[in-house]
Amino acid sequence: MANNQKNYDFHKESHTEPLEINMGPSHPATHGTVKFYLTLDGETIKDIDVEIGYLHRAFEKECELQHWSGIFPYTDRLDYTAGVLNNVGYALAVEKLIGIETPERCKYIRVIASEMGRLSGHYTNLAACAMELGALTAFLYFVEAREYLWDLIESFCGARLTHNYIRIGGLTSDLPDEFPESTEVVFKKNEKLYDDFAKLLLKNRIFLDRMRDTGGISAELAKEWGFSGPCLRACGVPFDVRKSEPYLVYDKLDFEIPIGSTGDNFDRFLVRMDEIKQSIRIIRQCLKQIPDGPINVDDPMWRQPSKDDINSDMESMIFHFKNVIEGQKVPEGEVYHAIEACNGELGFYLVSNGSGSPVKCRVRPPSFPMTSALPIMVKGSLLADLIPTFDMINLIGGECDR
Amino acid sequence: MIGVVDLIEVLVKIGFIVVLLVGVFAPVLTWVERKQSAVMQDRIGANRADVFGFRIIGLLHAAADAIKLIFKEDFIPRGADRTLHTLAPIMALIPAILAFSVIPFGGTYTFGDREVNLVIANLDVGVLFVFAITSLATYGVFIAGWSSNNNWALLGGLRASAQMFSYEVTMGLTIIGLVMFYQSLSMVEIVAKQDIFWHWGIIWHWPAFILFLACAVAENKRIPFDAPEAESELVAGYFTEYSGLKFVMFWTAEFIEIVTISALCVVLFFGGHHIPFIADAKLIDCFSSLGANIANLVAMVIGVTVFVSKLAIIIFLQMTIRWTMPRFRYDQIMKLGWKMILPLSLIWIFVVGLGMLTNLIPRI
Amino acid sequence: MEKQTIGKSLDSAAGMNNQKNIENNKNNSSVVINRVTDKFSDSKLIIYAHSLLGDDTIVVQPAEIINVMQFLRYDKLLTFDMMIDLTVVDYLGNQQIHPYLSDLRARFEVVYHLYSIDKNHRLRVKAPLMEENAFINSITGIWGGANWFEREAWDLYGIVFQGHPNLRRILLYEEFEGHPLRKEYSKTKRQPLIGPRN
């Protein structure tokens, strides 16, 4: 009888109802930073509501209470898998507002540091994706590669995770003497680990089945929802801030922007895999091209002078005193500067009223709009598909929730 | 009539199996799993537990785990069915041990006028018995998932029951060809017929072995088939709400199932306790200078050792698979079971039948 | 040095009326600004336009935000297909930064950053809002991605986006009182659910 009716509702007739379930915030896949409120029909996701904010630390409010140079440690905690990239982004935005240019050597070192940040971010992301699909061995291979990389980062900035390396108008320290050689040693090891990782996963039928045709999105929708970085490039849109609006010395370097075609999880994975290769290529070029010279702006007003200068030079002493007590007086105005972080466009929008602290320090987090598009990507697919999709979006709690 | 000696013999065999499984394999396997994965993953592995400064390459961790889990709070969530929640781990553990009762772990040896057969119960339908008993484990898993009053556990239980039911059917079909080949359902007879190396199951039935191993891993719910307990999806699946001793029981059941499945592989495909090219009689002959009884005893010890070594190799293979593969999606598991392995095993039955009809495959 | 001249041009622009303003800036501004100001030259829609520090900026009447955004997105020459960022700035006590703010008695400014992938150009669109009518039309119909950004702006600044499908708090919890990024929200303020400090 009921079958003949036009508006036959299976759920009503069979007296079943969808299963409503909270996935997170304390769930192995959500890393404690996000909650999915799922409505499941069997294993199929009928509806999903994403709740973020579990890692909200009032970043913008804190910045308004800090001096311009005191914000660097906060930026480290944005995308904590690639802290130095956030440092670079913020420093470039402030320098754009001030109108100063850093020396050539500083630019090269910043590129090296940001590419290492990108490597570290991609290693973490790809490894975590492998782990959440059950391939723990592959996970540990890339964690090992990341360890070697962090040793390298430690050698020039002294910290492994929260680098706090970049300063307005310069850097905290120069590269160590043996840096090119030790980098080459690390890259040799990492390339071997990369090959192992690729062999374990990229030709593995199970992995392909899990990643292919899951979590896909069209290029049009991706643009509309504010995608950037590897997830947008996986849709075949060759948008990379390093190419479209080159900052630092990216216009002098030879590298390619890998793009995908279908926009599914596997393409995102491959784009990130290729970007690891490109980043290594960029760092190698930088180490060849890097000129000698100062690493800081020769202007005590913006860049903290050295201890010797403070003791001997009157002007340096004055600015040292004033900058520590009042903060650098960044001129009045507003500025937006974007860099390419590992997840996409990381923008800083700063408003200054000419005092030592910003009126507004806004971060444009790349994973925030992508997370908002998660329902589009997973609705109607299986519960298990949520895992790789969520991994490939690479929601970093520190960056998304700020 | 069962005499006192028979009873003692059976009790000794049962004791041996239980000690081997619960006392040796379950704890040692946790250690092997940790250390093997550590070697594969370029790390050291667990080595911190020590007693008076002795660490014994991390072996003490098994003891530490046991002590920790025994003294943990036995937690039953609110709204759970207390009886079923307690019963479920028992229902999962008992079939796992019980299945071992028909698996011959050695040959037949004569001591004086007494024949000792190294199997607890020499059933004529041993193969069927194993499948019947292992399928009971499904109930334990499903009841655990349902009685926990937890949505993740329920989803895990659903996945587990669907997966285990499907793969039982398929696993049974994969070895039909083998049963036709040996013309027996008795484990002891199958092992006896593998006395000659060229009659080993793996030589004639290697496609069936691959299918069987896939089904066996799926039946054990281990990676790549661990969708019912996929930690990144379902937290811990059907045993999300279990702690303490009950958790240990699930855990032990899982490890014992690995051993059972591996033992089945050894018995059906790798000649049981036989050493390649050396028949049992020949082995006893080698030691005949020591006297008939001692020769038999030595042969028995060698046989059991060989059996356990083969077992270890198959277990090692399963662990390697576990640390190499990512996890299937739930629907892909079902597709693989019903659309790939089932038709392939049917084809294999047909091929074996055809081979035997045309005498291309010998009758033994 | 360069910065100071920029500051001056800002000051001088403050006193002029809208029309003159736009004319002034036309000479030394970019393709995007020219295109937008040409389109809306006859209306009072655009309050101010400049391209300081290389960032093209237009300040528009908040009531007309949908019209402007629709034009920006679908115009053949502009094709701003991505809404990069949406945020709010609270200018309480800092109105001197942008002179037009005091003219309009505006306190907040909703700031949109747009980007066109095909044309590779950016535009900042700003809509000043008064404290007492802190509401603006939602642009979720034009860029779906604006959804969460608008929720965040509501959450942290209390700007109401009319027509938003689901205007809830996003980073904070429902029981949170007040909007923390407003300048008057004290950094030492305690929330009722958390309670006083000992």
Image (tube, coloured by chain):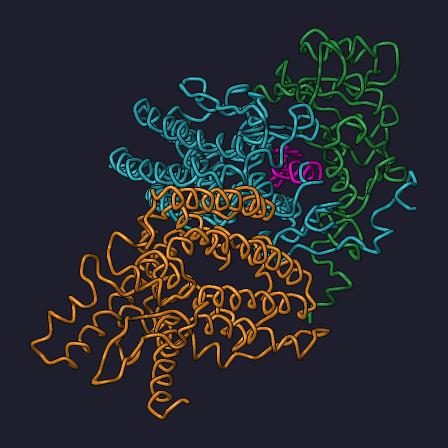
Residue A183 image-quadrant placement: top left
Magenta run includes residue A370: yes
What residue is rendered at 28% in x and 71% in y? B107
Percent position (x, y) of residue C147?
76, 36
Percent position (x, y) of residue B183?
40, 58
Q: For this rendering, which residue is in front, B21 or C169? A: B21
Percent position (x, y) of residue B22?
40, 76
Q: Is residue A322 visible?
A: no
Disc count in the image?
Answer: 0
| Colour assignment, chain A | cyan
Q: For this rendering, which residue is in front, B317 or B176? A: B176
Residue reaching furthest left? B289
Is C58 placed above or below A173 here? above
Is A97 on the left or on the right of B298, as rendered? right
Residue B304 image-quadrant placement: bottom left
| Colour assignment, chain B | orange
Q: For this rendering, which residue is in front, C152 or A59? A: C152
| Colour assignment, chain C | green
Is B199 placed above or below B75 here? above
Percent position (x, y) of residue B86?
61, 78
Is B316 on the left or on the right of A40, as rendered? left
Residue reaching furthest front? B358
Q: For this rendering, which residue is in front, B340 or A152? A: B340
Magenta run includes residue A245: no
Q: Which residues are magenta?
A: A348-376
Q: Is residue A257 visible?
A: yes
